[in-house]
Amino acid sequence: MFVYELNKRRSVDSIIILVILFGFYLRVSNVFDQVPWNGEDFMAGRILESKDILVNSAYPGVSKPLWQLMVAFGYKLMGFRLFVGSLWSVYFGTGIIALIYSICRRLFNSDVGLYSSLFTASMLTFIHISRLPRATMASLFFMLLAANLYLIYANKGWIYDREMVFV
């Protein structure tokens, strides 16, 4: 019985790696050819606000300071390119697939985690939002990371209140 569970776990782990790579491919394809225009506002102007952090050593007055710092760090690594914000969103969107698998595996079982991550990796709306240079994917990633860490520490007994409340 133990050998069967171990073999099933190995096969699920290899499948989830393929699902995460598939999700990353769907998100990163054509991200370098995008025009930074959403119809609502000119997103290139917002993304280039992070350039002030590096060039003028001045912090822009924006409502998302962590996002601006991450984009500025991307500029430092890759140069001043418009796709830097989109790449951060792609990375966070791919990380969300892994976090959803981890959370569903902890709450239910590995099959539920596999199916939920597969659905998340292939949802067109989620893929589209993962390509936009906005802080949406980073916010969702950090919220899911906090929920995952809560489940890890609650299972270890470090947190005594086991009720999970989503507001």
Image (spheres, rainbow, N blue to C red):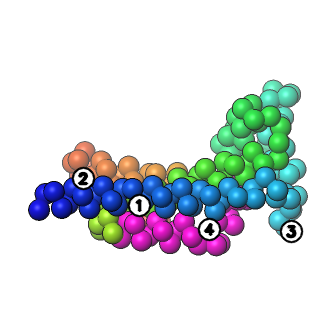
Identify the residue position indicated by label 4 in the image: 126
The label on residue 15 is 1
Q: Earlier in the sequence, mark 3 or mark 2?
A: 3
SS state under label 1: helix
The Cα–Cα distance between marks 2 and 4, rounded to whole angstroms, is 30 Å
Q: Earlier in the sequence, mark 4 or mark 1?
A: 1
Segment tinted magenta in the rendering: 112-140
Please provide percent x and percent y for residue 166: 44, 65
The label on residue 64 is none
The reply to whether the C-beta atoms of the residues labelled 4 and 1 are less than 8 Å apart is no
Which of the two discs, 4 and 1, sits closer to the camera?
1
Q: Amino acid at mark 1?
A: Ile
Is disc 4 surrounded by few (<14), some (14 to 19) or many (20+) residues within 10 Å? some
Identify the residue position indicated by label 3 in the image: 39
Q: Amino acid at mark 2?
A: Asn
The Cα–Cα distance between marks 3 and 2, rounded to whole angstroms, is 45 Å
Q: Earlier in the sequence, mark 3 or mark 4?
A: 3
